[in-house]
Amino acid sequence: MKVKDVKDPYKKLDELVEKNNGILKTGDALAEGISKPVLGKYLKLREFERMEHGIYLSPDAWMDEMYILHLRSAQAVFSHDSALYLHDMTLRVPLKHTVTLMTGYNPSRLTADGIKVYTVKKEL
């Protein structure tokens, strides 16, 4: 008879947070077998800040806006001023992040948050 390796769920969550530099995604926790009620208690106990739907930041972690944007919209590609900044081609941090999406994606959540969105046809 095999004995299942049962870890304390909070310990599993601590490991996920450590692995992801202070960021915890609900999907990652669920993939590890952590239930939503346990996750909710953990987030409250550890005083995590909700960054986006399903994305939480540890109180001792540094908040990287561009990384959070990438997590919430993985299909978005940083472009224009944001791309220049990421490639060290400008010293100035963009006042407004700029991304490009394929035509067909709904950019309303991004534009509502002040992000400039361009679209490009799938064929390109």
Image (cartoon, helix red, strand yellow):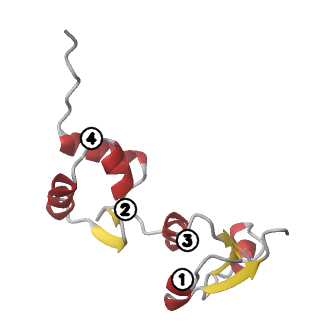
Label 3, residues with CA under 10 Å away: few <14, some 14-19, many ≥20: few
- Residue 75 occupies which quadrant of the picture? bottom right
* Real-space CA distance between mark 1 and mark 4, rounded to the nearest whole angstrom: 32 Å
Return the residue at label 2: 61
Count of residue discs = 4
Q: Percent x, y for residue 70? A: 55, 66
Can you tell which mark lies on residue 110? Answer: 1
- Residue contact at pointers 2 and 1, CB within 8 angstroms: no
Secondary structure found at label 1: helix
Residue at screen point 67% across, 82% down = 92
In the foreground, 44 or 60: 44
Residue at screen point 53% across, 65% down = 67
Q: Is residue 29 above or below residue 57?
A: above
In the foreground, 91 or 119: 119
Of labels 3 and 4, earlier in sequence is: 4
Residue 86 in view, yes or no: yes
Return the residue at label 4: 12
Q: Quarter of the image for the N terminus: give it.
A: top left
Return the residue at label 3: 66
Q: Percent x, y for residue 72? A: 49, 68
